[in-house]
Amino acid sequence: MSAQANTGTVLDRILEARRAEVDHRKRVLPETALRRDGLNVLAELKPASPSRGVIREPFEPVELAQSLQRAGACALSVLTEGEFFRGSLKNLRDARKSIQLPALRKDFIFDPWQVWESRANDADSFLLMVVALEDALLRDLILLGRELGMEPLVEVHTGEELDRALGAGARIIGVNNRDLKTMTVNVETSFALAGHIPDECIAVSESGIRTHSELLKLHSAGFDAFLVADGS
């Protein structure tokens, strides 16, 4: 009886701790952060890019993450692809542990194992690029993310990709203003698709946003949040 009582006490402590953690994670979920009133900036930690080369060296993810949190970012997007962007999962882990903001893993994700990997490395969300995924796989990755407590940001560039994202059940839609084939950027891409994103979805405009005036116009067009980065 004593062993059972002790086990129950330990179990109670474990459950209490887990409930507290779940409550905290629910408060910092990307959906909550991106739905705040005002101009919600999803700030990106990106050491390098194919279009710009090295952007920041040395790259200090903890210092940058804390600085962006103080500046008022609603969430962080952390590049983890190593060859072209010089990112890493360590950058994601270190940045996430140093702040109270949700962190999105930005990488080229096309395998369920990568979703599990994202969860294991403290990501609160992850990027899915419609252009790189078949419909069935896109749907499966979205569902797996939800099972693991991560709502993915599903990225589109055209009306056809938007239709596919919505058909797969995406709830957070990111409109990438960069054409990944030509690497050119045009913010008009976001304006063209804004009216086709359902109100129940969270709409994020990504890349090429340079001025406060553009933020205001995109917000008026229906966007809830904006991904902004050096070299975007």
Image (cartoon, rainbow, N blue to C red):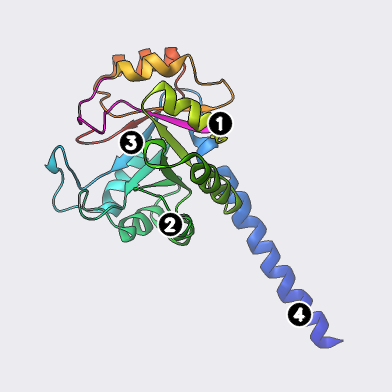
Q: Which residue corresponds to mark 2? A: 114
Q: Residue type at mark 2?
A: Gln
In space, the residues marked 3 and 2 are separated at their CA atoms by 31 Å
Q: Residue type at mark 4?
A: Thr
The residue mark sitting in front, 1 or 4, is 1
Sooner in the amino-acid sequence: mark 3 or mark 1:
3
* Circle count: 4
Classify 10 Å Cα crowding around label 2: few (below 14), some (14-19), many (20 and above): some
Q: Which of 224 and 131 is in front in this view?
A: 131
Residue at left offset 54%, top offset 42%: 139
In space, the residues marked 1 and 4 are separated at their CA atoms by 47 Å
Q: Residue type at mark 1?
A: Gly
Secondary element at image label 4: helix
Question: Which quadrant of the figure contains the N terminus?
Answer: bottom right
Q: Where is residue 94 in the image (x, y as percent from the top left)?
A: 35, 58
In space, the residues marked 3 and 4 are separated at their CA atoms by 46 Å
